[in-house]
Image (tube, rainbow, N blue to C red):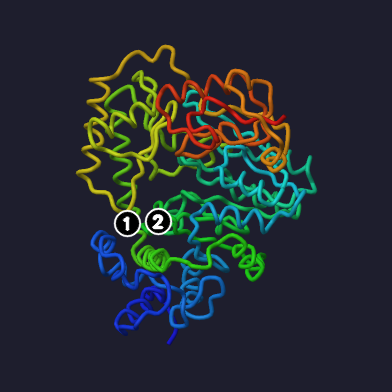
Amino acid sequence: MGLSQINAPIYEALRKFRRMRVVPFDVPGHKRGRGNMELTEFLGEDCMSVDVNSMKPLDNLCHPVSVIKDAEMLAAQAFGAENAFFMVGGTTSAVQSMIMYACKSGDKIIMPRNVHRSAINALILCDAVPVYVNPDVNRQLGIALGMSVEQVEKAIEENPDAKAVLVNNPTYYGICSDLKRITEIAHAHGMLVLVDEAHGTHFYFGENFPVTAMQAGADIASVSMHKSGGSLTQSSFLLMGENINSDYMRQVINLTQTTSASYLLLSSLDISRKRLALSGREIFAETVEMAEYARSEINGIGGYYAYSKELINGDSIYDFDVSKLSVYTLPVGLAGIEVYDLLRDEYDIQIEFGDIGNILAYISVGDRKRDIERLISAMSEIKRRFGKSGAGMLTQEYINPIVAETPRRAFYADKVSLPLEKSVGRVCSEFVMCYPPGIPILAPGELITDEIIEYIKYAKDKGCSMTGTEDINIEYLNVII
């Protein structure tokens, strides 16, 4: 009997396995939870009983031949891809695998600088050379936008030996590039197109969303099913087009991916794919309705600006993801991170992130109307209780970096630790970023400037969660000797 989207092969195999009452003389050592009762009480017997090791009836993610292979085939069909792989190292491992597939040591890759740190980490691992396309910036909102087609075309013409073009689509804020046109230009020059589609799972299953990577003809896409798709944290898909050698891709993935894949993560991917394939249209229509309602109400408060499709300019903002609730906060005299902290500390509301000028409230499959109402009323109260003049607020979210050295050489170079102020003019050998969103302010190989130091100090002062440096307090930076 053939499989269809109503099937979930890994989930079904696990249910069958649980009924068999197999005596475990294999790992994990908790032996279906009996060996760690406190953990079992916390997570539940059902969960612990399927936290199992790879075995013949359950297949093996490193070399799937049965149920995992079937589940990946169904995922490929659901996403409109030639092949799809289950990823248990998050979209980080998917992004790194697609870059390591496309590039070897010394190969160039064209990419926007406002990438997630996972992409730059991949360059450190495989020694590829980045050709950055600095994204346009919306000066009012202070946010980096998509890649301009003209800038990509220029980068391709100046670097005809580049192996691939990487595109963020959509950005954390919901902004999309002209993915189809970029793909056509890259392919005309013999380059692969890689898409970090971490925030675009819903594009594949909802209606009237921006074009997906697979629809646009891209070669590989990394999709965070755990973000808008409802699977467990750390579970993602890697999608491939027809020109990708999936057998070689599996080998690349296996360089870094665990040989002990979690069946909790795998089954969550399987079940979530089934749910979205069968009901995604209705789920995401409701999600968009909630986001549109919240946007309208927040804009009605005054001061805040919840932006949407009105930003579209046909190029660096080619389209916008209306399920994203991105809100500019500076007109009420509060940095995004300050609104983020107030929502959590005063109102018990946890949003996705706040940065210098914006917040993002992630709306997805699990939200309820009453939660949206609570967020709106809390933001109204925050403006009334804590709002002030916006004078003296730093507005620039994104600073174009000056690249002086490749990420790999800078990361592994001999280095010295200097106080922030004394590092100006030197080349950084580590990352500095606010997380989320995980887009580096500084990456290995970039020149440290007064403007960047001012930004780091301001972000620290406002309470941004800063990561990436050896010095946990971010008072010192490692620079190349």
| 444 lies left or right of 105 | left
Among the two numbered marks 1 and 2 on one chain, the one whose residue lies closer to the N terminus = 2
> Mark 1 is on which residue type?
Ile
Q: Position of residue 160 (x, y in %)?
A: 79, 46
Residue drawn at the location 46% of the way across and 73% of the way down: 71
Tag of residue 283: 1
What amino acid type should be assigned to the residue bearing mark 2? Gly
Image position of 328 with respect to 320: above or below: above
Q: Position of residue 248 (x, y in %)?
A: 66, 68
Q: Secondary structure at mark 2?
A: loop
Do the CB atoms of the residues marked 1 and 2 lie less than 8 Å apart?
yes
Q: Quadrant for the N terminus, please.
A: bottom left
Question: The residue tagged with tag 1: helix, strand or loop?
Answer: helix
Q: Where is residue 240? Give x, y as percent.
A: 59, 63
The spot of residue 121 in percent (x, y) is: 61, 46
Q: What residue is rendered at 55% in x and 62% in y?
A: 257
Label 1 CA crowd tier, 10 Å (few <14, some 14–19, many 20+)? some
- Tag of residue 206: 2
> Looking at the image, which is closer to me, 424 or 281?
424
Q: Give the CA separation, mark 1 to mark 2.
A: 8 Å
Quadrant of the rendered image containing residue 40: bottom left
Residue 389 vs residue 45: left or right? right
Characterize the local packing of mark 2: few (<14), some (14-19) or many (20 or more) Cα atoms within 10 angstroms: many
